[in-house]
């Protein structure tokens, strides 16, 4: 799949908040580690360099995180791994109503986009109606869902 990947939505401002939050958490970790182990000189520089590298990789993955489409298929980029599927391997794209339970309580009800494969398996996407990209933009969530469905439908029509 050597085609051009496009994320059909702009990243939300929540991503930048998460990146800033992670930077603050790593700064606190560095401060606590330096104080706990009485680090000086090279130890401080090694710790700072290591945590900066971890933050840079994490921030890059957070920025790249999401669902991308092309004429050939769909690419799901998570924080740790990415997954590519061609349109011919996908049976359908649907919304899934999620309910999180903790004992007797229902914590969250929300919609996510799920990809159904031809072999009967389902693949969860990074698209969540209340996530950092769509929390304040519910119309955009529906538009992205429709865009992915339309691309899948168009790929199916092209095959026939």
Image (cartoon, rainbow, N blue to C red):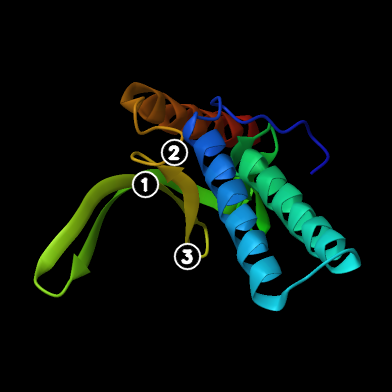
Q: Nearer the viewer, residue 42 or 107?
A: 42
Quarter of the figure with the C terminus: top right
Q: Residue furthest right?
A: 42
Residue at 67% in and 29% down: 6
User: Dot 2: what SS?
Assistant: loop
Residue for badge 3: 121
Is residue 116 at least partly visible in the picture? no
Q: How many numbered discs sit on the rendered protein? A: 3
Pointer 2 residue: 132
Residue 127's disc number? none
The tag on residue 112 is 1
Q: Label 2 crowding class (10 Å Cα cut-off): few <14, some 14-19, many 20+?
A: some
Q: Earlier in the sequence, mark 2 or mark 1?
A: 1
3 vs 2, front mark: 2
Left or right: residue 91 versus residue 77 is: left
How far apart marks 2 and 1 lie (CA) works out to 13 Å
Q: Quadrant of the N terminus?
A: top right
Residue 25: x, y in percent?
A: 56, 55
Where's residue 50, x and y in %? Answer: 80, 61
Q: Give the vertical position of 23 relative to 119 (above or below).
A: above
Would residue 54 be found to the left or right of residue 121 on screen?
Answer: right
- Of the two numbered discs 2 and 1 in the rendering, the one whose residue sits closer to the viewer: 2
Taking 52 as reference, is 68 left or right? left
| Disc 3 element | loop
Name, please, the residue furthest toward the left: 104
Other residues around mark 1 within 10 Å, as few (<14) / some (14–19) / many (≥20): many
Q: Residue at x 77, y 31 (%)?
A: 4
Where 30 sits versus 5, above or below?
below
Query: Which residue is depicted at the point 37% across and 44% down?
Result: 94
For marks 3 and 2 on the same chain, the one whose residue lies earlier in the sequence: 3
The answer for how far apart the CA atoms under marks 1 and 3 are is 16 Å
């Amino acid at each position: 799949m050597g085609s051009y990947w496009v994320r059909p939505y702009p990243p939300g401002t929540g991503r930048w908040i998460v990146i800033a939050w992670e930077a603050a958490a790593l700064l606190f970790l560095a401060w606590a580690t330096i104080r706990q182990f009485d680090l000086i000189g090279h130890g401080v520089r090694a710790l700072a360099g290591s945590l900066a590298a971890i933050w840079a990789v994490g921030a890059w993955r957070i920025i790249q995180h999401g669902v991308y489409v092309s004429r050939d298929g769909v690419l799901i980029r998570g924080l740790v791994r990415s997954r590519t599927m061609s349109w011919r391997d996908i049976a359908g794209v649907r919304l899934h109503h999620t309910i999180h339970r903790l004992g007797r309580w229902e914590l969250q009800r929300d919609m996510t986009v799920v990809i159904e494969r031809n072999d009967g398996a389902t693949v969860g996407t990074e698209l969540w109606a209340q996530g950092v990209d769509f929390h304040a933009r519910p119309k955009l969530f529906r538009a992205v869902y429709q865009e992915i469905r339309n691309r899948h439908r168009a790929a199916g029509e092209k095959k026939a």
